[in-house]
Amino acid sequence: MQIHQIVVPTPFYVGPVNVYLIKQDPITIVDIGPNTEEAFQALKAGVENLGLRLDNIKRLIVSHAHADHYGMAARLQETSGAEIFLHSWEEGALGIKQDYTHHRKLLQRAGVPEEEIEKFETGYLKISPLLGDKFQYKLLEDEEEIIFEKESLRVLHTPGHTPGSICLMRESNRELMAADTVIKHITPNPMLNCDPIDRLRRFPSLSEYLCSVARIKELAPTLVHSGHGHSITDYGEHFHRLLKQTNDRQSKVISLLPKSGATAWEATSKVFPNVGREHKYLAVSEVQAHLDMAVADGKLKVEKQDLIERYYI
């Protein structure tokens, strides 16, 4: 089994996305990039450099439902008839199925002002063309095997960055395609999401994420391919550095809470006082995730005032 990295440009701050072409029948690609012409041409050139054509690709595995990872899915399916697979917990996050009614309530509970919520939704509408058109897909579950001619990949459900994020493990040499669950140069953001089982509940993204990266550590991968940036050859060292960064950030969030308490939105302005407008959603997602975990660990308490949640030492 040959796993080849193709770097595809994105218009996002995170930079280009890594997609992985597996050169064994059926020819499979893991993630694909956003729905832009620049991304399409880069993908096409990358595939052709490997001696293949786009219409040779018969399968697309989507690691998670973010535009930079699945936006060209419909275009590929139209070109090659490829089957597309993603985890069942990502189905509701596809752009074609996205309903912001419950998501708006999550932001309201976080204390985000209505005018800011409107800006978030306007921003989403601006990037919605990057999600591409509707496509047919099949659902994956944890521990499923993706069969090739001579080998297979094991699906690992690794919730955290999104509820339905997955990694793919090659058992023969413990090589892992981790997408945005493991990134060498940044800590993947625990995004604010509705729980896929109960849309009225907020998904405990940071707690789930820490369980996922600990599960990966137990599998002792020899090489981790990331969704952005370079691969990781010493996952154990990366894991311990990630834990330290997470603990340091949580300590900072808790230390900045005033005695009078704060909403997640108010706490965000203290933790990230200089955050740019384009990163406000990511910032409030991260702070909310830390507050939720601190409550679960008994470090904070939360009280509801109307719909809004306020956190106290």
Image: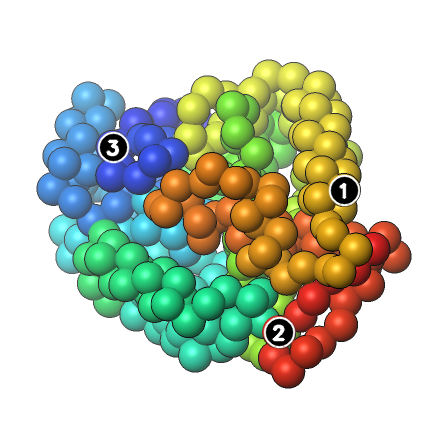
Q: Secondary structure at mark 3?
A: loop
| C-alpha separation, residue under disc 3 versus residue under disc 2 | 39 Å
Q: Quadrant of residue 255?
A: top right
The residue under label 2 is 308
Residue positioned most to the right: 298
Q: Seen in the image, is 281 located left or right of residue 51?
A: right
Is 43 placed left or right of 185 in the picture? left
Q: Nearer the viewer, mark 3 or mark 1?
A: 1
Tell me what residue is drawn at x 54 percent, y 40 percent. Answer: 272
Task: Give the residue pinned by disc 3.
Answer: 9
Residue 245 screen position, x and y as percent: 69, 30
**Residue drawn at point x = 59 percent, y = 17 percent:** 233
- The amino acid pointed to by label 3 is Pro
Tally of numbered discs:
3
The answer to the question of whether label 3 and label 2 lie on touching residues, with beta carbons closer than 8 A, is no
Q: Which quarter of the rendered picture does the N terminus lie within? A: top left
Does 62 sit above or below residue 116?
above
Q: Is residue 171 above or below residue 160?
A: above
Q: Which mark is residue 86?
A: none
What residue is disc 1 on? 255
Which mark is first along the chain, 1 or 3?
3
User: Hey, what amino acid is under mark 2?
Assistant: Ile
Residue 97 relative to residue 268: left or right: left
Measured in 3D between alpha carbons, the distance from the residue under mark 2 to the one under mark 1, in whole angstroms, is: 21 Å
Distance from Cα at disc 3 to Cα at disc 1: 39 Å
Say which residue appears at 42% left-offset and 30% top-offset: 228
Q: Is residue 256 above or below residue 263?
A: above
Q: What residue is shown at x 27% (from left), y 32% (from top)?
A: 8
